[in-house]
Image (cartoon, rainbow, N blue to C red):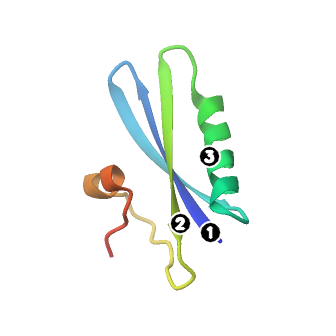
């Protein structure tokens, strides 16, 4: 399966989002990889949260920024 990890990084009020594709055999493995990446990014005053989205076999990635609604709900709008 294919997954996408959405990272929310913020440093004292300045928040950014980054998206990274993840290839893993299960959702649990993808979440583990994403959490380990978020843990490495977290430092003093720099925090990182992550949410993993599953991509279906009939869906494809479009190179665009996620909308605020997609970021908050965790659902990609077609």
Which label number is shown at residue 54?
A: 2
Identify the secondary structure beneath mark 2.
strand
Residue 39: which quarter of the image?
A: top right
Please report the residue visible at 39 percent of the width from the left and 38 percent of the height from the top. 16
For this rendering, which residue is in front, 19 or 69? 69
Whether residue 78 is situated above or below residue 26 in the rendered picture: below
Classify 10 Å Cα crowding around label 1: few (below 14), some (14-19), many (20 and above).
some
Q: Dot 2, how many residues are within 10 Å of its Cα: few (below 14), some (14-19), or many (20+)?
A: some
Q: Is mark 1 in CB contact (under 8 Å) with mark 3?
A: no
**Residue 30 pos. (x, y %):** 65, 55
Above or below residue 47? Residue 29 is: below
Which residue is painted at 45% across and 71% down in the image? 62
Q: Residue furthest left?
A: 69
Please name the residue that numbered disc 1 is placed on.
2
The residue indicated by pointer 3 is 34
Q: Residue furthest bottom?
A: 58
Q: Nearer the viewer, residue 30 or 63?
A: 30
| 9 versus 25 height, above or below | above
Q: Position of residue 44 (x, y in %)?
A: 54, 14
Distance of label 1 from label 2 (alpha carbons): 6 Å
Task: Specify which label sits upstream in the sequence, 1 or 3.
Answer: 1
Residue visible at 36% across and 58% down? 66
Report if the CB atoms under discs 1 and 2 are less than 8 Å apart: yes
Q: Marks 1/3: CA distance?
A: 13 Å
- Residue furthest right as drawn: 25
Q: Is residue 49 left or right of residue 26?
A: left
Q: Quadrant of the C terminus?
A: bottom left
- Residue furthest toward the front? 28
Q: What is the distance, in whole Å, between disc 3 and disc 2 at their CAs?
A: 13 Å
Q: Residues within 10 Å of mark 3 (few under 14, many from 20)?
A: many
């Amino acid at each position: 399966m294919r997954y996408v990890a959405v990272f929310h990084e913020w440093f004292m009020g300045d928040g950014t989002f980054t998206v990274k594709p993840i290839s893993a055999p299960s959702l649990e493995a993808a979440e583990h990889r994403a959490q380990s990446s978020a843990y490495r990014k977290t430092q003093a005053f720099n925090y990182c949260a992550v949410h993993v989205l599953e991509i279906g076999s009939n869906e494809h990635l479009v190179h665009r920024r996620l909308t605020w609604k997609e970021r908050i709900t965790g659902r990609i709008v077609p």
